[in-house]
Image (tube, rainbow, N blue to C red):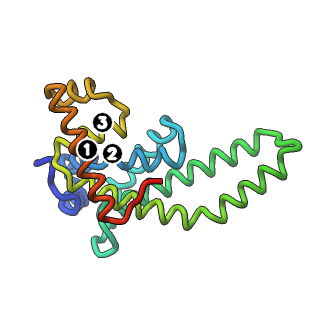
Amino acid sequence: MAPDTPLPELMARVALQDRAAFKSLYQATCGSLFSVALRILRNDNWADDVLQEAYVNIWHNAAAYRPVAGAPMTWMINIVRNKAIDALRARKAERAATTDLGEEAPDAQDRLAADAAHEPQQLLDDSLVKAKIAGCMGALPAAQRQALALAYYRGMVHTEIAQVLNAPLGTAKGWVRRGLEQLKSCLEAAGVTQP
């Protein structure tokens, strides 16, 4: 299967329990979905756990995906986001049950209430921005997309990227540089601004 097969086609094949399509879907989306989980959980191990659960959910529920409801990436981001939020809430509840807050309790509760009030809109805004980023990433040539994913989602430096992609160092640097330039232009055109 071609690595640049469109996500809707991959989703349709995953719905038929096509393991090769699922592998391609995973390879095409794991970096973006990991960053969604990591942004919410702020812990690599927790994000890995959530990502694994999300892909199990995607595998079992791919037939429930409806293209008219949104892009496949948006559907998968929602699954990851919901699982990450559930995991975060479970961890907060576990900490609250095992930690005596003492005199900090009123301040901590006020902060949690303030966070909860802004959370739904912020999550929606973040989801829309992430969907735009995913769209712009998807528009990049495969080599540039892979180089950027390795650099930003896996934290690799140019030499590691060159080694993983079996390319000369200068070529890997060029992929990252050109990919960033194209990504920046695409995001600006989509109305995404830097924080």
In-image side of 102 versus 115 (left or right): right
From the top left corner, tell me how far across and down residue 84 is, in percent: 51, 51
CA distance separating discs 1 and 2? 6 Å
Q: Which residue appears at 28% of the width and 46% of the height?
A: 180
Q: Are marks 1 and 2 in contact (CB under 8 Å)?
A: yes
Location of residue 98 by image quarter: top right
| Residue 30 numbered tag | 2
CA distance separating discs 3 and 1? 12 Å
CA distance separating discs 2 and 3? 11 Å
Mark 2 falls on what kind of element? helix
| Residue 87 numbered tag | none
| Residue 150 numbered tag | 3
Q: Which residue appears at 55% of the width and 54% of the height?
A: 85
Mark 3 falls on what kind of element? helix
From the top left corner, tell me how far across and down residue 76 is, in percent: 37, 58
- Which amino acid lies under the numbered mark 2 shown in the image of this protein? Cys
Category of crowding for the residue at label 1, using alpha-carbon neighbours closer than 10 angstroms: few (below 14), some (14–19), many (at least 20): few
Above or below 27: residue 78:
below
- Which amino acid lies under the numbered mark 3 shown in the image of this protein? Leu
Task: Return the residue nearer the eye: 183 or 147.
Answer: 183
| Residue 27 numbered tag | 1
Q: Which badge, 3 or 1, comes first in the chain's sequence?
A: 1
Above or below 20: residue 60:
below
Mark 1 falls on what kind of element? helix
Category of crowding for the residue at label 3, using alpha-carbon neighbours closer than 10 angstroms: few (below 14), some (14–19), many (at least 20): many
